[in-house]
Image (cartoon, rainbow, N blue to C red):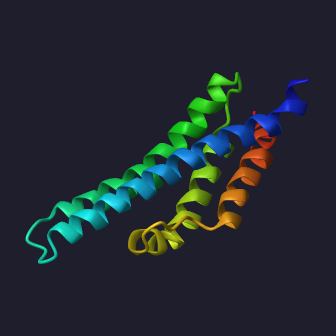
Amino acid sequence: MSRAVQPFKGAAVAVVAVLVCHLILSAGYAAARAQKRADPDGGSWRSDEIHLVTFVLGILLVMPLLLWAGMRILGERDNYLLIILGSLFWLVGAGFNLSHLQYTPGAHLPVPLLAGMVAVGALLAPASRLFR
């Protein structure tokens, strides 16, 4: 029973992780744009700091943490393949589309990237058992 449910658990955890990371990126870059509009001369480093914190949180730190914690909450252990490859997929996919989020108000990451991340979660959750 547990093996049949693993892809759904992986997909559910990936959906939550993608949603949270996308919200961090959207809100962070909106705040950076607002700061840039408030100080167009660039006398403040605040906009650059917001960009850096948004990138580190939304791309590098939160995704692996949510993938790990989500699978642990759902009772799955040793999902290192999901955590590592899922985070790498997010880093590459979201990283290539970051300029669109940074400079376009109201922009979102492409739907194929988001759907692909959910598919990666569904495929890698049961594959992690192969390496135990």
Q: Is 20 positioned to the left or the right of 42 in the image?
A: right
| Residue at the farthest bottom position | 41
Please provide percent x and percent y for residue 7: 81, 40
Q: Is 77 positioned to the left or the right of 69 in the image?
A: right
Please provide percent x and percent y for residue 110: 62, 68
Q: Which image quarter: residue 56?
A: bottom left
Q: Quarter of the image containing the N terminus? A: top right
Total marks placed: 0
Q: Is 23 positioned to the left or the right of 102 in the image?
A: right
Seen from the viewer's position, the closer of residues 123 and 132 is 123
Please provide percent x and percent y for residue 39: 14, 70
Q: Quarter of the image containing the C terminus? A: top right
Please provide percent x and percent y for residue 17: 58, 43
At x 73% / y 53%, what residue is drawn?
A: 120
At x 39% / y 58%, what residue is drawn?
A: 55
Q: Is 23 positioned to the left or the right of 110 in the image?
A: left
111 versus 42 height, above or below: above
Q: Which image quarter: residue 51?
A: bottom left
At x 58% / y 35%, what residue is drawn?
A: 68
Seen from the viewer's position, the closer of residues 99 and 1 is 99
| Residue at the farthest left position | 43
Seen from the viewer's position, the closer of residues 126 and 94 is 94
